[in-house]
Amino acid sequence: MNRFKLIYEIALQLLKARWKQTLVAAIGVTFSITMFITLLGFMNGLNTLLDGLILNRTPHIKLYNEIKPSAIQPIEKDSTLNNTHHFIESIKPFAGKPEIRNASAIMNYLKKDVRVNGVAPKISAQVFYNVGAVDLTGAINGIDVEAESKLFFFQDYVVKGNYVDLKNIPNSIILGKGAADKMLAKIGDVIQVTTAKGDRVQLKVVGYFQSGLADIDKVQSYTSISTAQKILGKPNSYITDIQIKLKVIEQAPKVAKEYARLFEIDAEDIQTANAQFETGSSVRTTISYAVGITLLIVAGFGIYNILNMMIYEKMDSIAILKATGFSGKDVKYIFVSIALSIGFFGGLAGLGFGFLASAGIDQIPFNTSALPTVETYPVDYNPKYYVIGIIFSLITTYFAGLFPAKKASKIDPVIIIRGK
């Protein structure tokens, strides 16, 4: 115990003797960790915001009936032509129905699945918004308001009006902000929509919806499930989509294939539907880590140079230490302790300044019409960034001090003293 205490005291004295250089090295580590924490916090906060625009509104698994060509063409049913090759062109889609058969039974089964966090039915319908003599292309989504709010944060995207009115007021609609601006429709106005079959329905505007994606907000609107069924002239059992949120999102591809096989229906998982967003997030995160680690390595070279200069200037002291009984391992411990001290205290300061910088960015106003719910720049304060930062700080400074320390441990005191 006394040996290690003595080694620590010697390392401390050497640090004090070269305090200006020590301070410069510590500032280098502090700056690196500060930028590392700030970059990761800001970049991942931005990733969360951008991905949330899509991922928060996208089910982990969607069950639906896709419009596609019939798997078996009539000519293939002719047994007399089994041994011939068929050239079939201009195949038309199969005249199937978009509605899901036994939707209620499927949803009851899904709600009992322990892997499922929630289920929300949906009706998708293409319509035209009638504005005088002009017809605007649109899409109406009939939703279960409570399930949509619970699973997909629907209420957060309703920028004006009350989302509950969609359930409480018959024949009501929440318009996309872009569509409302095109139609000059105000809350309380009655608009007219035409279905694909030519039926016209009047709906009362009770709110505006803004997802942050302008192209979607120009065409998309929401009604309740019952209103959508009434618009399309369908029975209460009519459902076109079943949206599923899982407890573990990574299970989505596997579970989607299982449901598609079990219910004999088309299933799309979130990874397949939004692969480009995950790729963008991973690239931005990788860049942040790369920049932060590069800064730490640069700081490590600064520590390496300072310790090298210290060794050359303290040759006499090192020779005396070894002549008085200190081993090469003890000398190595001294210089490694110096490097780790710089890394530890510089890293702690960097964590503090990184948090303050992140908090400062978090207070900068960020106002854009595309993201009405966002008021300041997004920042992620995940504790793992701080843990990674201090670990990298210690690892970098350890290796920066290890090589000069090995050099110091091999100094022959006889040659140094004889030279003097």
Image (cartoon, rainbow, N blue to C red):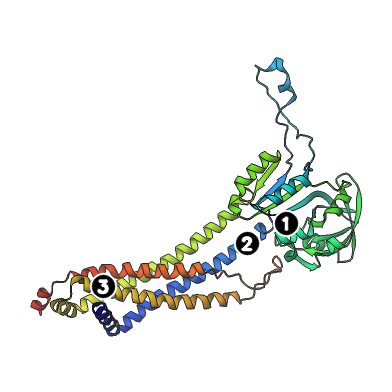
Residue to which mark 3 is pinned:
333
SS state under label 1: helix
Which of the two residues, 372 or 214, is positioned nearer the viewer here?
372
- Say which residue appears at 21% left-offset and 79% top-offset: 313
- Mark 2 or mark 3, earlier in chain: 2
Q: Are marks 2 and 3 in contact (CB under 8 Å)?
A: no
Label 2 to label 3: alpha-carbon separation: 48 Å
Which residue is outermost to the top? 80
The answer to whether one can see residue 9 in this image is yes
Going from N to C along the chain, the mark reached first, 1 or 3, is: 1
Which residue, given by chain and number where applicable, does mark 1 sit on? 215
Q: Secondary structure at mark 2?
A: helix
Q: Quadrant of residue 402?
A: bottom left
- Of the residues shown, which amino acid type is indicated by label 3? Tyr
Q: Quadrant of residue 185?
A: bottom right
| Classed neighbour count for the residue bearing mark 1: other residues with Cα under 10 Å, few (<14), some (14–19), many (≥20) | few
Q: Nearer the viewer, mark 1 or mark 3?
A: 3
Residue 261 drawn above or below residue 218: above
Distance CA(mark 1)–CA(mark 3): 63 Å
**Dot label at residue 50:** 2
Q: Is residue 184 visible?
A: no
